[in-house]
Amino acid sequence: MTQDARARGQNAHFAGAAAEEIAIRAYLARGLTLVKSRWRGPHGEIDLILRDGETVIFAEVKSSTTRDKAAARIKPAQMQRVFNSAGAFLEGEPLGQLTPARLDVVLVWGAGEVEIIENAYGHG
């Protein structure tokens, strides 16, 4: 790996961590509880896992310079990996797959602008 590639990777890591911190603050301001960040399941990583009462929220955080660019970073294959990993996480819950849950997308752009799209992968 070249030094430039390593630097780009580090910058992306730090930018992602900063965006996740912004997302966490937005959820905490809504009264949710953080359960895990960067949880690794058998199908991949989930950026944030939170609780809102009995409901488990799985959040994928995307960041860029604009809202539209952040939203464009959401890919179907990645959505499927998050969905599959969420299922694996729910296996450890007392109600298993019957646990109330939703999958959110959090867009972070500019100087800390944030939008939480609830149930982004579901219906309604």
Image (spheres, grey):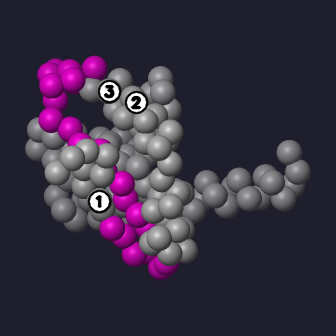
Q: Residues within 10 Å of mark 2 (few under 14, many from 20)?
A: many
Q: Nearer the viewer, residue 108 or 52?
A: 108
Determine which quarter of the picture holds residue 93: top left
Residue at the disc numbered 2 = 85
Q: Are marks 2 and 3 in contact (CB under 8 Å)?
A: yes
Q: From the image, tell me which residue sits under label 3.
A: 87
User: In the image, what residue type sits under mark 2?
Assistant: Ser
The quadrant in which the N terminus is found is top right
- Crowd around label 1: few <14 · some 14–19 · many ≥20 (10 Å): some
Magenta stretch: give its range: 91-115
Q: Which residue is mark 1?
A: 117
Q: Report, in whole angstroms, how far the alpha carbon at label 3 lies from the one at label 1.
A: 20 Å
At mark 2, the secondary structure is helix
Distance CA(mark 1)–CA(mark 2): 19 Å
Does dot 3 land on a helix, a strand or a loop? helix
Residue for point 36% across, 40% down: 36
Q: Which amino acid, mark 3?
A: Gly
